[in-house]
Image (spheres, rainbow, N blue to C red):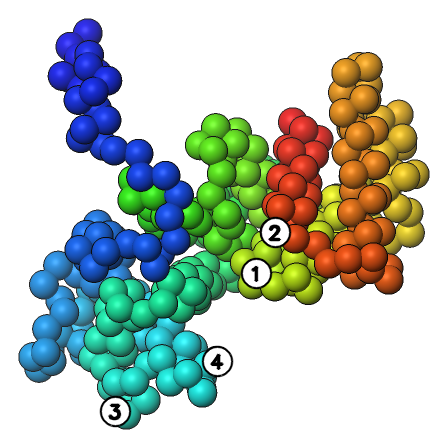
Amino acid sequence: MFKLWSETNKKVEDKLKPNLGLRDWNDLTADEKHLIWKHLERYFFEKNAYTRDIDSIYTFIGDSEEKNFKRKRVFYSIAALKNKYKVKNLAKNFIESGAPESAFEDFITIFKKEDGDVVIEMLSIYCKVLINERAESNTFRPSSESVEDYNNRLLKWRWEDFDEFASDLNEVFVDFGVNVHLTRLGFVPRQDKKIIEEVYNPVMIAISNTKWSQVNALLSDAFSDYRRGTPQCYSNSVTNAIAAVEAFLQILVNNKTGGENLSSLIPKARKSGFIPQDPFTEKIFDNIESVFARERQETGIAHPKEKYATEKNARLILNLAMVFLQHCLQ
């Protein structure tokens, strides 16, 4: 098999694709932000679509459906950002004119020049708009297709556009060392590539099913709280992550949420075969249960706190929760 020069020489690969580690968005240079924009630009605008001459470029009527979708996603994202954060006045051009072209200008300006938290928030809103386009829509079901096959195909179709965007964004973010990863639940802290591919991604895809909607909501809140970065929010993150695991087991064991807690659910899940019963696995899950119980008691919000959770506490619990869910979902 023919090999690239970089595949035969590790030094060349490192030179062409350096490992930049993990960096906050604010640590990127202006040139790096511009390059990231160029790699992702096709999701926001058609090539050469952005111009100050708006005679026909920004007219929604009469253009291709794909162009319209792209423009509307950007337009609605900036409109939502304007309404959600009124005091900050992030959409400076749009609030003055309300015209589509001003929203597009604000989108680019925020991406390249604003604080990293604002950029990631804007991209989060954009993703919500993208997801909502198909959230309630259906595709044609042939009479020969089973309900199960149709539902699986429908779920995949509803996430199709988002998954494509997330895949490309994450690839670019990895190359530039950006320290967040986009999932179906939102942006989460970037982990080792193997953990992302073998734990995080499979779990996020699996719990997209409506069966796990309450687990999904709790886990999404846990990651949102983590990203806010305050001691109170880290404690909230711990509580929501453990609650997500508890809700998952409640549905797994009882087909509904509520009632039992981890201490009774884990033995039942083992007995029913939802959790492997080999000695090694049992020991691990005993330890995970004790860690969850201690962190919920000491740093969660469900009980009087002995202390607030730290970023390290919250990240540990989030990772343990994801490993726990991934192991059960197998």
Q: Which circle marks residue 229 in the picture?
A: 1
The type of residue carrying mark 3 is Ser
Q: Tell me the residue that label 3 is attached to.
A: 97
- Amino acid type of disc 4? Lys
Q: Is residue 143 above or below residue 49?
A: above
| Disc nearer the start of the sequence (3/4) | 4
Camera-side residue of 320 and 25:
25
* Residue 83 point in image, percent of width and height: 45, 84
Mark 4 and mark 1: Cα distance apart in space: 20 Å
Tag 1's secondary structure?
A: loop
Q: Amino acid at mark 1?
A: Gly
Is residue 46 toward the left or the right of residue 317 in the image?
A: left
Q: Are marks 1 and 2 in contact (CB under 8 Å)?
A: yes
Point out the frontmost of discs 4 and 1: 1
Quarter of the image for the C terminus: give it: top right
- Image depth: mark 1 or mark 3 in front: 1
* Horizontal relation, residue 52 to residue 265: left or right: left
Residue sitting at x 71%, y 31%:
328
Does residue 113 lie above or below 317 as drawn? below
Residue that carries the numbered disc 4 in the rendered image? 84
What distance separates the C-alpha of mark 2 from that of mark 3?
41 Å
